Image (cartoon, helix red, strand yellow):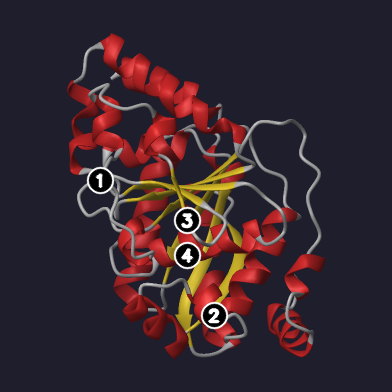
């Protein structure tokens, strides 16, 4: 495993814009790489990670879309100080197309705003569901699609995990967060076949490298021993005041404090993501098969 602390020190010493030198991954195909971010409990920094990862990807030349699938409490747009007029609910009801609700931001990424109405997708007719999946497929022109899910594991969260090429589980060192993170991995392992190839872990709000490694090692051991699941440790994010200050300003910390410890950590995480192989989650077309099988 690479020494993240040393890499972070190198990033801090480098000139601003060093992220441009992060190695870029040669994709196997032109399909979008779908990254689903999930957590066992709320309040662990899932949306913050999703948005700031998107910005780190954009800075290495990737076309990125963040899809807010936190169905009950959609807040990606809140973090970016945006008030969308249209959202996923309008797409489901065929009032708007996906391209019509796609919002460009001032930060070089696009977002798809979420809505609580999306949670009713399981009650739609087969024709409506198929039409919705076709709309989702129009997002595939992007290089990276980051899906910010709701906390916990609802059927919709599992659908978005199933279509992903990478699944990033985020936790904190708190015992309850670790327990819930293990819980979500257990459900994923039970419900979705071959998901172990795409499961990755990020430990948020750590005070030092040792604490992060302890959490990661514990998660890797117990998921491997009891679930027979391979969990890859992507890295950690420091507990950094720059994050909370940026949230209050409704600005991503990658923009508000680009040289902060948290920003350097996210750069490192994206750098590692670019160097890892990913499973073929089947894309959004795989989601319609799961939904229709329910």
Going from the N terminus, do you reach mark 2 or mark 3 first?
Answer: 3
Label pair 1/4, CB-CB below 8 angstroms: no
Can residue 273 be seen in this snapshot? Answer: yes
Q: Which of 113 and 84 is in front in this view?
A: 84
Q: Which of 112 and 9 is in front in this view?
A: 112
- In the picture of the structure, the residue carrying the numbered disc 4 is 49
- In the picture of the structure, the residue carrying the numbered disc 3 is 105
Residue 25's x, y, as percent?
A: 78, 49
In whole angstroms, how far apart are the C-alphas of marks 1 and 2?
Answer: 27 Å
In the rendered view, does 270 fall on the left or right side of 20?
A: left
Residue most extreme to the top: 127
Residue appearing at x 76%, y 39% in the figure: 27
- In the picture of the structure, the residue carrying the numbered disc 2 is 262
Q: Which of marks 1 and 3 is in front?
A: 3
Going from the N terminus, do you reach mark 1 or mark 3 first?
Answer: 1
In whole angstroms, how far apart are the C-alphas of marks 4 and 2?
Answer: 10 Å
- In the picture of the structure, the residue carrying the numbered disc 1 is 71
Going from the N terminus, do you reach mark 4 or mark 2 first?
Answer: 4
In whole angstroms, how far apart are the C-alphas of marks 1 and 4?
Answer: 17 Å
Residue appearing at x 37%, y 83% in the figure: 244
| Residue 275 higher or lower than 193, as above or below | below
Can residue 214 be seen in this snapshot? Answer: no
In the rendered view, does 168 fall on the left or right side of 38?
A: right
Few, some or many C-alpha atoms within 10 Å of disc 2 (few <14, some 14-19, many ≥20)?
many
Q: Nearer the viewer, mark 4 or mark 3?
A: 3
What secondary structure is found at the residue carrying circle 4?
A: helix
| Residue 178 higher or lower than 191, as above or below | below
């Amino acid at each position: 495993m690479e020494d993240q602390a040393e890499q972070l020190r190198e990033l801090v010493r480098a000139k601003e814009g060093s992220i441009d030198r992060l190695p870029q991954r040669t994709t196997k195909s032109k399909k979008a790489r779908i990254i689903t971010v999930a957590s066992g409990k709320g309040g662990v920094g899932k949306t913050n990670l999703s948005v700031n990862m998107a910005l780190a990807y954009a800075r290495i030349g990737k076309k990125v879309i963040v899809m807010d699938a936190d169905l009950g409490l959609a807040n990606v747009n809140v973090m970016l100080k945006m008030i969308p007029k249209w959202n996923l609910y309008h797409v489901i009801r065929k009032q708007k197309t996906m391209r019509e609700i796609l919002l460009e931001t001032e930060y070089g990424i696009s977002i798809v705003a979420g809505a609580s109405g999306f949670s009713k997708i399981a009650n739609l007719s087969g024709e409506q569901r198929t039409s919705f999946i076709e709309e989702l497929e129009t997002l595939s022109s992007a290089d990276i699609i980051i899906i910010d899910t709701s906390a916990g594991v609802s059927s919709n969260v599992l659908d978005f995990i199933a279509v992903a090429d990478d699944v990033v589980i985020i936790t904190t060192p708190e015992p309850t967060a670790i327990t819930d993170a293990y819980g979500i991995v257990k459900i994923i392992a039970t419900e979705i076949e071959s998901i172990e190839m795409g499961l990755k872990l990020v430990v948020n709000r750590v005070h030092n490298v040792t604490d992060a490694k302890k959490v990661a090692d514990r998660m890797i051991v117990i998921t491997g021993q009891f679930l027979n699941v391979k969990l890859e440790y992507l890295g950690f994010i420091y507990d950094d005041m720059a994050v909370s200050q940026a949230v209050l300003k409704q600005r991503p910390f990658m923009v508000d404090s680009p040289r902060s410890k948290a920003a350097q950590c996210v750069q490192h995480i994206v750098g590692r993501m670019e160097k890892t192989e990913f499973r073929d989650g089947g894309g959004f077309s795989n989601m319609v098969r799961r939904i229709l099988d329910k």
